[in-house]
Amino acid sequence: MLNECRGMYPRLMTCPLFYSSSNKGESAAMKFRKYFFLRILTCILTIWIGVTFIFFIPRMFPSDPVENMIGQIRSRSGQMDPVELEALRRSLRVQFGLEGSLLEQYGSFLWKGLLHFDFGPSLMSYPTPAGEIIRTYLPYTLILSLTTTLIAWIIGNLIGLQAGFRKDKRSSKILEGIAICLYPVPYFIIALILQIVFAFQLGWFPLQSNINSMGGAASYLGSLLRASILPAVSMLLLGTGWWIISMKSLSGTTAEEDFVLYARYRGIPEKTIGRNYVFRNSVLTQVTALAMSLGGVFSGSIMTEIIFGYPGVGTLIQKAILQSDYNMILGCITISIVAISLSTLIVDLIYPFIDPRIRYS
Amino acid sequence: MKRFWKNANGRLKTGMVMTAFFLVLGFAVYYIPHINPFTYNSYPGKLPPSGQHWLGTTSLGQDVFWLLMESIHNSLLIGLIVALIGTVVGVFVGLLAGFSGGAVDRMLTVVTDTFVVIPSLPILILMTSLMKGSSAAILMALVLAMFAWAWPSRQIRSMALTMKERDFIQTAWFSGEGTVQVIMTEILPFALTWSLSNFMNATLSAIASESSLAVLGLSPANLISLGNMIQWARERNAIFAGQWFWIGSPIVATVLLFIGLFLLITGYNDYLSRKRGR
């Protein structure tokens, strides 16, 4: 899955701070507070619209999860007593949150699902609540996607700065060429290629990750590291590609601006110009772009996990789909939307603190 | 056309050639008569590449080359349909928001912004897992299109906001042209050059989304697409059996198609910005 901003240079995006129309009379602090408030409001709105979507879509489809379940149970256990069947149907309807009017269902879904992460029991491992299972899987996904995103962002921006600042060097062109060949490829394809080459052909890594949680801490960490290397590398390759491409185009245009030219005439060393003039000005846009890219990174993490069988939310979603565990799918997706929206919010709220143009007095 | 080619940059040229290659494969070579590649046991299974079967056959006795042509055709078709719906809706919503202003604009902007940041893959997974394989390809395209309109709409809105203040638009207003006419004759031509890059972008992400869903087993089971072809090869253990042409050819095709489209998009954007004199 791709970022929504794919193929667009991030410069085209509107900077969120100046997004809302601001009057000239307002003080910086007031503007700042308004920005905070607006941003949090948008985040809540995003989560609300997303969750409402999730709630209403399944109810618009003709397929009924309860009937599907009953069909499965009947095919396994053969003939069933009609009275028993009716009781089963009723209890399943309660557990799926399908009892009562649509509005009541919606209210209880928002209250239980969104605020308490209670999605009812999982069907794959029956009485265990889906929320509890997700809670054990979620940290793996978060660690994998957040660390690789951060590392890719740093490496990509540093390489991109070099490539954009010294545009005419041969090495810059080669680096950009590599980035262009990596970035547009979907996550699962890179994962698949790495799996074929390094796990199947060379046999350096296990084909499917399995994490040893039985032994001591050392064996747990060791197996975790071994299982994470290939997924992490495949996510790093793609992420770095995008940051190189975008940073190169950003720093390339910044390097041609008048104030950089002036700095050159003043005899400031190239290194200082690169660091203090070009980098600091272009990295701001990249922070906004980072916030915008998180949704795509999470989707990429889902796909990468599935290819490698890495024990995260992605693998959980795949298992749930295979076994029609409807509560589990709903839970995973609600939590993904909340997680992505919150991390986007955090990056956006950090933004004003690193923008040197804003002073709070 | 000749002048366009002369002014085009290297990326745009490479991208155009690569994309054109796939368009020819998907929409011309595809129509050369051949045995339906979907039927099992048309040929003996697991044949190596030869003069008769350029890319060999699968373990189910299907010709890999024609399977590949069929999947390129379907993937491109889905991408183009989604992009078309997304661009048309996006341009309409964007223009409406940009030109109406006030409460309508604010509401549309909030909805658009939400759709831009909302993670689409999880919601697509939910929707397609409810349809689960039984859905038709066109339904799949409609579902994907739900997330394709937001980004173009946002861009067209900001374009419309700047256009509104331009002199020639004012002139058109004051000379008594109606809103619809102003939009159709004065604004749409501008919006279209902008939308072309959005259109290609949407094509790319639609193909990527479809193939991601296919790997999850959520794409329609009767649809031969690049993603489904990879997924079938994985399911039938093509990796372990060493049938590299079966699993390798859709992977290579996807990679090349995506690089080609990406070069086309960035090259076109560069070309446009140079033309505007930057």
Image (cartoon, coloured by chain):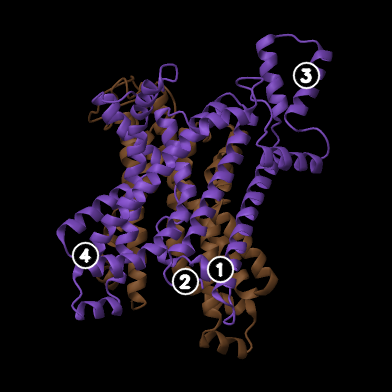
Chain colours: A purple, B brown
Q: Amino acid at mark 3?
A: Leu
Does label 4 lie on the same chain as label 2? Answer: yes
Q: Amino acid at mark 1?
A: Phe
| Mark-to-mark CA distance, 1 and 4 | 37 Å
Q: Are marks 3 and 1 in contact (CB under 8 Å)?
A: no
Q: Which quadrant of the figure has residue A27?
A: bottom right
Q: Are marks 1 and 2 in contact (CB under 8 Å)?
A: yes
Q: Amino acid at mark 4?
A: Lys
Percent across and percent down for residue B20 are 33, 54
- Find numbered disc 3 in the image and state the secondary structure of the residue it sits on: helix
Does label 2 lie on the same chain as label 1? Answer: yes
Q: Which subunit holds the residue at mark 3?
A: A
Does label 3 lie on the same chain as label 4? Answer: yes
| Mark-to-mark CA distance, 2 and 3 | 62 Å
Foreground tag (3 vs 1): 1
Q: Earlier in the sequence, mark 1 or mark 2?
A: 1
Along the viewing direction, whichever of B44 and A126 lies nearer the viewer: A126
Q: Could you tell whether B75 is left or right of B250 in the image?
A: right
Residue at image x 23%, y 68%?
A: A272
Q: Are marks 1 and 4 in contact (CB under 8 Å)?
A: no
Q: Which residue is mark 3?
A: A88
- Find numbered disc 2 in the image and state the secondary structure of the residue it sits on: loop
Q: Could you tell whether A128 is left or right of B86 in the image?
A: right
Residue at image x 62%, y 70%?
A: B96
Q: Which residue is mark 2?
A: A358
Foreground tag (1 vs 4): 1
Along the viewing direction, whichever of A236 and A184 lies nearer the viewer: A236
